[in-house]
Image (tube, helix red, strand yellow):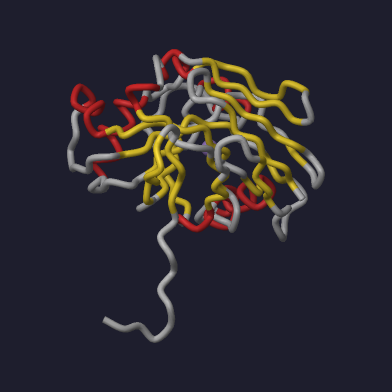
């Protein structure tokens, strides 16, 4: 087969402890999935989970022990951090029940759902899609994937983010409104999950702005840390 120009290379994420990389298929994100974050966004109560996507080439892939570089994006005056647990799907499927979700998971990573909050808020106000606020270039930093067997009890892990050494976000994955298994159930009812899919599971409270020169360090206990500098 030949192409009219070279096809885009497959985006991949390193896997801790092995040379093979995780090839990325799609990036799903869950909106407002921690109660305290829903409140700071002006919402209360448990609503059905809702999803948006980012393009695979919006990933900023940070190799183990490295610091990622994220350029400050265009068009915004209010770039927000959202620290998130990311689920890496190893086995696809449709209509997966929460009780069976674990066998579809390859592993977990620490990710940032970077958000042009001013543009997202404007789109919300106008009832328009969030793409320009969420799915821009370099909007999805991610660290290495820890295979599930080595990840410990991710569902009860502390999740936190520091900016320039100061705490911004601190919570526990146990506070997810829709936990990982329930999220997979809902997501796989709407789309057929494929090996290589990533799911950004939502952010806890404390989202705020960063500026050029800031260094972000995010952790999920048992998964190591993700360090990114905005330039
Ligand atoms: Mn998010």
Residue 214 is left or right of residue 126, and the answer is right
Please provide percent x and percent y for residue 86: 45, 34
- Residue at left 58%, top 32%? 83
Residue 204 versus residue 12: which sits nearer the camera? 12
- Residue at left 55%, top 37%? 64
Above or below, 177 relative to 90: above
Residue 94 versus residue 18: which sits nearer the camera? 18
Q: How many numbered discs sit on the rendered protein?
A: 0
Above or below, 167 relative to 80: above
Above or below, 136 relative to 164: below
Q: Residue furthest bottom?
A: 4
Q: Quadrant of the N terminus?
A: bottom left
Please provide percent x and percent y for residue 98: 23, 25
Please provide percent x and percent y for residue 8: 44, 69
- Residue at left 38%, top 22%? 150
Can you tell which quarter of the image residue 215 is in? top right
Residue 152 versus residue 112: which sits nearer the camera? 152
Please provide percent x and percent y for residue 114: 61, 44
Residue 39 is left or right of residue 211, and the answer is left
């Amino acid at each position: 087969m030949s192409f009219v120009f070279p096809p885009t290379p497959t985006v991949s994420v390193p896997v801790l402890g092995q040379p093979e990389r995780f090839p990325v298929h799609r990036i799903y994100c869950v909106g407002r999935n921690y109660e305290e974050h829903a409140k700071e966004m002006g919402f209360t109560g448990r609503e059905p989970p809702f999803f948006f996507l980012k393009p695979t080439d919006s990933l900023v892939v940070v190799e183990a022990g490295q610091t990622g570089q994220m350029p400050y994006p265009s068009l915004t005056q209010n770039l927000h951090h959202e620290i998130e647990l990311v689920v890496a799907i190893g086995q696809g499927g449709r209509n997966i029940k929460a009780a069976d979700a674990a066998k579809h998971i390859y592993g977990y990573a620490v990710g940032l759902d970077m958000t042009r909050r001013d543009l997202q808020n404007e789109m919300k106000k106008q009832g328009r899609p969030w793409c320009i606020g969420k799915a821009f270039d370099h909007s999805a930093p991610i660290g290495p994937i820890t295979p599930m067997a080595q990840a410990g009890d991710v569902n009860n892990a502390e999740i936190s983010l520091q900016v320039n050494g100061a705490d911004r976000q601190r919570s526990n994955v146990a506070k997810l409104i829709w936990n990982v298994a329930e999220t997979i159930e809902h997501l796989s009812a709407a789309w057929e999950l494929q090996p290589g899919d990533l799911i950004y599971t939502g952010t806890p409270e404390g989202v705020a702005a960063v500026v050029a020169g800031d260094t972000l360090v995010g952790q999920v206990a048992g998964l190591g840390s993700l360090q990114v500098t905005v330039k």
